[in-house]
Image: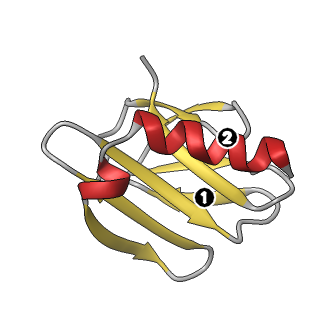
Amino acid sequence: MLEHWRTLGQFRKRHVALARGAHEKLADVPYTFSRRTASDKVVVALGAKGSVTLKVGSVFPDGTPLRDAYSGAGTKVEGGAVTLTPHARGVVLLEQRQ
């Protein structure tokens, strides 16, 4: 449980968009949303199970390398979406890879 909250806290600390960004719902199932400011953007999915495809093209252009900060898995936007297998908790925290 401590690791869960530590991961969420570190993600929030890295991304000002979570506190100040505009919220945009991207999908109902799994519940997916983006938070964006002029200098920061993230996509979060909750309740993701199994292999999921998340439409993120309105936030990140094709070819953008992303990282799921919750599981540590890397992926790349292709066709406006990413496909990945989330952590067992069903949380996906997508950020642009540096």
For image coordinates 26% across by 40% down, the residue present is 40
Left or right: residue 20 versus residue 3 is left
The percent position of residue 78, horizontal first and vertical second, equals 45, 41
The percent position of residue 61, horizontal first and vertical second, equals 29, 41
For image coordinates 82% across by 46% down, the residue present is 2
Give how far apart the Cα atoms at labels 2 and 1 are.
22 Å
The 10 Å Cα crowd at callout 1, few under 14, some 14 to 19, many 20 or more, is: few
User: Is there CB contact under 8 Å for labels 2 and 1?
Assistant: no
Left or right: residue 35 versus residue 90 is left
Amino acid beneath label 2: Thr
Amino acid beneath label 1: Thr
For image coordinates 38% across by 40% down, the residue present is 15
Q: Is residue 11 visible?
A: yes
View extreme (left): residue:
38
Q: Which residue is disc 1 drawn over?
A: 53
Considering only vertical position in the picture, is 95 above or below 22?
A: above
The percent position of residue 18, horizontal first and vertical second, equals 37, 54
Q: Earlier in the sequence, mark 2 or mark 1?
A: 2
Left or right: residue 39 versus residue 77 is left
Where on the picture, by quarter, is residue 29?
Answer: bottom right
View extreme (top): residue:
98
Q: Nearer the viewer, mark 2 or mark 1?
A: 2
Q: Nearer the viewer, residue 79 or 2?
A: 2
Q: Which residue is disc 2 drawn over?
A: 7
View extreme (bottom): residue:
28
